[in-house]
Amino acid sequence: MIYRVGKTVIWFAIAFGLAACPAERFRHEKYVCKSVSFDLDSIIVNDTDIGGEVKIIGYDKDRTAIIKAINDDHIEIEASRMTLKLDRDDGSVRIVRGNRYAHLACKRSIFTM
């Protein structure tokens, strides 16, 4: 009887310990856009907090941008001279640089662990 109660308590402790772990420890979002006119090959988002850094891979050089606003549907990023708005649902990216505007259909991939 005591053995059965002890075994049940151990199983509940293990189940509770596993349930307390976060479901998502790491998230990697990548948007592949291929825009030569904006020097934009892909956008990589690892840190999904306001103020987090985003890596913008271009054809000439790579840049770092800062997340200004984020929610479940959109990410707003500000780089040196341009603003990017990423749609997290369909993967599209709106870019504003000076008086130039573009709406790109990008391929989005998400890796979580």
Image (tube, rainbow, N blue to C red):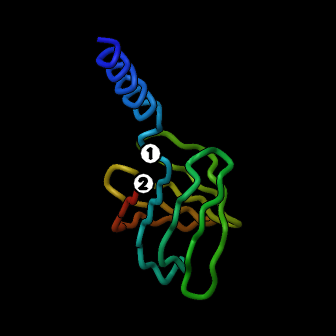
Q: Which mark is residue 113?
A: 2
Judged from the image, the secondary structure of the residue bearing numbered disc 2 is: loop
Image point (37%, 23%), residue name? 12
Q: Is residue 58 left or right of residue 21?
A: right
Q: Which amino acid does label 2 sit on?
A: Met
Residues at discs 1 and 2 in contact (Cβ within 8 Å): yes
Task: Give the quadrant of residue 33.
Answer: bottom left
Task: Give the quadrant of residue 63.
Answer: bottom right
Determine the residue located farthest toward the bottom in the rendered image: 60
Q: Nearer the viewer, residue 102 or 109?
A: 109
In the image, residue 65 above or below residue 76: below
| Mark 1 or mark 2, earlier in chain | 1
In the image, residue 41 above or below residue 13: below
Measuring from the top left, give residue 92's x and y in whole percent. 37, 59
In this figure, which residue is indicated by the disc labeled 1? 24
Measuring from the top left, give residue 2's x and y in whole percent. 34, 13
Judged from the image, the secondary structure of the residue bearing numbered disc 1 is: loop
Q: Which of 24 and 102 is in front in this view?
A: 24
Measuring from the top left, give residue 42's x and y in whole percent. 48, 73
Image point (55%, 77%), residue name? 57
Task: Give the quadrant of residue 110.
Answer: bottom left
Q: Nearer the viewer, residue 6 or 55?
A: 6
Neighbour tally class for label 1: few under 14, some 14-19, many 20 plus, Cα within 10 Å: few
